[in-house]
Image (spheres, rainbow, N blue to C red):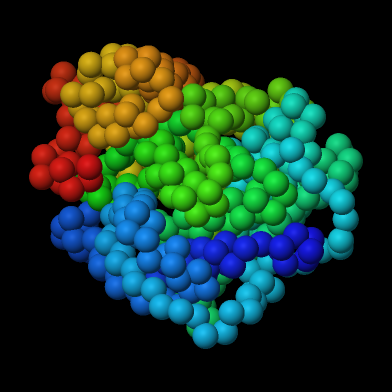
Amino acid sequence: MNRQLVEGLQDRALDLLEIAALVYCADAAVSRGGPADQKMGEKWHRRFVATMPVRDLKFWQRESVIQALEETLMFLSGDRFEFSFSTKDEQDAERSRFFKFGRNSSWKPHRVLMFSGGLDSFAGAVEEIVEQKHRVALVSHASSTKIAPVQKRLISVLSERYGPETCRHIPMTAQLKSRSTAERTHRTRSFLFAVLGSITATAFGLDRVSFHENGVVSLNLPPVGNVVGTRATRTTHPKTLKLFTDFLRLVFENDMRVDNPFFARTKADVVERISHLGMADQIVETRSCADVHNQTHQYFHCGRCSQCIDRRFAMLSKGLERFDPEDAYRVDLMSDARPNGTDREMALSYLRNAVFFENATPDALTRSFPVVLDAVNHLDSPPDTAMSMIADLLNRHGKAVTSVMRRTLESKSPGEFPEQSLPRLYGEMQSALPLPFVPAASVDKTRMRNYR
C-alpha cells in the first residue's frame, strides 16, 4: 500500500487494527479443547477479558461501540470478549507492523475485495476485472507462509493478462511471535480481514468491502452432528456481515458496507464462472483446503475436509476436473478409502445433506435446519423471498452433488469400488434410505439452541 495513504489514516483506524490483531492472536493462542472433547461444540466457548490502551479513548469507551464490538465477536466466534480501554502512552502509530508499503502512485481502485487465494475470491476478482472492467485492490491476510505465494502467483497472472493497472495486492501479516498456534479454527479471522479491508477502502475514499464466498459455505449449515457452536464457522454468514457493517459504520462514521456478491451462487456456479471468463487454467493454482499446514508440493489438498470435498464435487459437476488434477489430493474423492471414522462421517454427512437439499422446500429447510432463519432475517429481501432464494441455492447444490454420484455409479457398481470409499458408502447409504433422514443439524435440540 502507498505509505502516504496509510499515514493519513485517523488514529481510531489504527486502534481498530490493533484491536482486531489482539482478538485474532488471542483466538489462536488459546485452545478450545481439541476434537477429542466429548461435548465438542458445547464446551468450545471461551471467555476473554481484554484491557487495551488506545489513542481515541473517548470513542472506544462509548457503550454503543463496546456493545457492537462484543456482539459482533460473540456471533462470529461463539466466544465472549469483554473489553476495557485506557489511554495509550505512545500515540505514534506503528503502521509498518501491518502494511507492506509499495511505491507511491496516484492509482485508485473502483472496488476493494478480500482475496484469500481460494476459488471464490479468485472468481470475484476475475469477474470484477474482466466483466465489470474495474480496478481492484485485493486485500489479503496470510497466516501461513504456504498461502502468500499462492496469492502472489494468482495476482501476477491477472496483472499479466489484463494489465498492471487492473489490480494491486495489499497483503497483511498477523502471527503470534512464537509461531505456536494452539487453536487453528481461527473463527475471528474474518473480523481481522474485514477491518483490514475497511481501512484500505477508507484510505482510498471508498465505503464498500466485498467478501466473495458461495452461499452454501456462507450459510454453513452443520454437515455433521458435532459441528455446532463454534465449530460451525460464520465467516461470511449474512448476520456476520450485517454486524460488521453496523460496527464499522460506528468507527468510520460513514456508509461503510461489507457484503458478499456471491451469496446466491453455489461452488459449481463459481467454478463455471471462472471457466466462462477464460481463467480455467488458473484453477489449479487456487487453494481450498482447510489443512493448510500439512500441504506439500505434491498434495495441495487433503481431500478429507469439507472444503476439499466441496471443491472436487464442483469440478466434477461442471466437467472441469482436467483443471484440477486428482493427484493434487492426498485422498481422491471417489477411488480412495476413508478408514478414519471422522473423515468418513464428514464425507457421508456432506452427501446426506446434499440428498436432502436436492428437493427440499422452504418449509422443510426451516424444520430441519432452523438456524437458516438467522440468515433469512439478515438478507436485504422480504423473508419469503429470501427463504425461496436460499431453498433454490441449496436445491442446485444438492442436484450438482447427487448428479456426480449418480454418474459415478453408472460407470461401475458400488461393489467395484474399494471398501470405505465414497461411492461404496453412498451405495450403502442409498440402500438404507427407507429409514427417515434426520439432518445432523437437528440431532440435539440443546446444541441447536447453543448454535443459535
Instruction: Tell me where residue 33 appears, x and y as whole percent.
Output: 26, 68
Does the image show residue 183?
A: no
- Count every numbered label the image shows and give the total: 0
The one nearer the camera, 237 or 252, is 252
Residue found at the far front of this picture: 58
Q: Residue at x 59, y 51 (%)?
A: 198
Quadrant occupied by the N terminus: bottom right
Q: Residue at x 40, y 44 (%)?
A: 243
Instruction: Tell me where residue 437 appears, x and y as whole percent.
Output: 19, 26
Q: Is residue 439 left or right of residue 293?
A: left
Give the vertical position of 42 relative to 397 (above or below).
below
The one nearer the camera, 236 or 341, is 236
Residue found at the far bottom of this picture: 89
Q: Is residue 404 left or right of residue 315?
A: left
Give the vertical position of 176 relative to 342 (above or below).
below
Q: Quadrant of residue 427?
A: top left
Instruction: Tell me where residue 39 appears, x and y as whole percent.
Output: 16, 57
Instruction: Tell me where residue 105 appears, x and y as whole percent.
Output: 88, 55
Quadrant occupied by the C terminus: top left
Give the vertical position of 335 relative to 13 (above or below).
above
Q: Residue at x 74, y 53 (%)?
A: 169
Does the image show residue 379?
A: yes
Q: Is residue 153 left or right of residue 228?
A: right
Q: Quadrant of residue 442?
A: top left
Q: Residue at x 74, y 38 (%)?
A: 110
The one nearer the camera, 142 or 96, is 96
Give the vertical position of 442 relative to 200 (above or below).
above
Q: Quadrant of residue 25?
A: bottom left
